[in-house]
């Protein structure tokens, strides 16, 4: 078992995995650590779906935008905001069911995310690797169908899990003093923004320039700097508007959007 601070500081997302399966007992151990995360009202309004079945993974692959780790990793873990279970318990006890609104979804989403990061750290402490997949949220409606999620239960975050078959370079982070505000928020001057993002821009551009595919992507998309990579290529207004609509639809279908 690795030292806690080295687990935190040595984190890198793993996108290539060995074929070695992850033993059921080890999966149980790291999931158990996940459920020790703080939880709103200790309700634990989330469910964790562990997928190892190859056919199910194949179904999930396009929903995760064909990211290679879906098939490469032996395990996929999907964390869902889930008030289905709690509402059933409430009903059995003649208690108002509630939890069919946006606030409930957000609470479930926070709890699911906290649990997911606990599981991720526990996994990394055991020598496993993970890579979160934002496609879990972007495709939440379709993933719900594949995973047979009931109402009041929607996917929030997910990651691939397995033994690393790569040791990527550690990715940069913004400097701590660019993120932390003591007592109250101190808004940023342009000069400060330039200082804070300087290293990210330098490292990011190096990465994009080194990789022929990324370089070509930048050229084709007309992105001249890292900031433009973010909003002209990766996270365009159009794509995020479309994802927003999809996520909204999913929440509505799952029964989380009652406003009265
Ligand atoms: C919510 C979330 C979604 C992510 N989605 C993806 C993804 O779909 N594909 C991917 O390759 N990496 C994904 N990542 C991983 C990030 O790209 C990665 O954490 C970031 O680049 C920093 O690199 P590091 O984790 O190696 O330090 C995601 C991370 C988070 C937290």
Image (cartoon, helix red, strand yellow):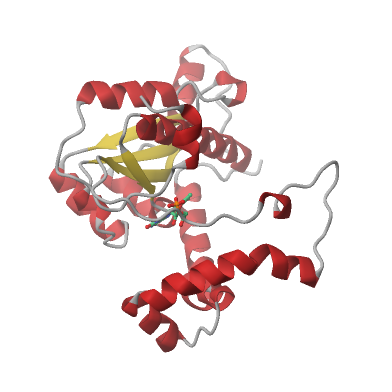
The residue at 53%/32% (across/down) is 111
Where in the figure is residue 101, as x and y percent of width and height? 59, 39
Tell me if residue 60 can be seen.
no
Ligand 1 quadrant in view: bottom left
Task: Count numbered badges in the picture.
Answer: 0
Q: Quadrant of the N terminus?
A: top left
Where in the figure is residue 246, as x and y percent of width and height? 46, 59
Q: Quadrant of residue 183?
A: top right
Tell me if residue 138 can be seen.
yes
The residue at 77%/65% (across/down) is 192
The residue at 73%/47% (across/down) is 180
Task: Decide which of 195, 162 is in the foreground and name it.
Answer: 195
Where in the figure is residue 176, as x and y percent of width and height? 67, 49
Relative side of 38 to 215, left or right: right
Q: Quadrant of residue 19?
A: top left
Relative side of 16 to 187, left or right: left
Q: Quadrant of the C terminus?
A: top right
Where in the figure is residue 212, as x and y percent of width and height? 33, 79
Task: Decide which of 174, 68 is in the foreground and name it.
Answer: 174
Task: Decide which of 64, 252 is in the foreground and name it.
Answer: 64
Relative side of 2 to 37, left or right: left
In the rendered view, tell whether residue 53 sits above or below residue 64: above
In the rendered view, tell whether residue 159 sits above or below residue 43: below
Relative side of 250 to 130, left or right: right
């Amino acid at each position: 078992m690795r030292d806690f601070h080295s687990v935190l500081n040595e984190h890198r997302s793993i996108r290539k995995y060995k074929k070695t399966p992850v033993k059921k007992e080890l999966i149980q151990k790291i999931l158990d650590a996940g459920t020790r995360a703080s939880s709103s009202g200790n309700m634990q309004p989330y469910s964790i779906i562990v997928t190892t079945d190859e056919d199910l993974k194949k179904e999930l692959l396009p929903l995760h935008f064909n990211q290679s780790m879906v098939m490469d990793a032996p395990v996929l873990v999907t964390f869902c905001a889930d008030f289905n279970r709690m509402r059933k318990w409430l009903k059995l006890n003649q208690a108002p069911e509630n939890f069919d609104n946006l606030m409930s979804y957000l609470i479930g989403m926070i709890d699911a995310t906290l649990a997911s990061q606990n599981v991720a750290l526990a996994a990394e402490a055991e020598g496993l690797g993970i890579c979160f997949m934002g496609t879990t949220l972007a495709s939440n409606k379709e993933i719900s169908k594949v995973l047979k999620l009931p109402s009041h239960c929607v996917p929030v975050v997910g990651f691939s899990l397995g033994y690393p078959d790569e040791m990527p370079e550690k990715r940069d982070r913004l400097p701590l003093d660019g993120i932390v505000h003591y007592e109250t928020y101190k808004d940023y001057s342009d000069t400060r923004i330039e200082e804070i993002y300087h290293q990210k821009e330098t490292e990011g551009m190096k990465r994009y320039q080194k990789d022929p595919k990324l370089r070509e992507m930048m050229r084709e998309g007309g992105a001249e700097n890292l900031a433009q990579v973010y909003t002209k290529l990766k996270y365009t207004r159009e794509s995020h508007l479309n994802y927003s609509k999809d996520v909204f639809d999913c929440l509505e279908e799952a029964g989380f959007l009652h406003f009265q």
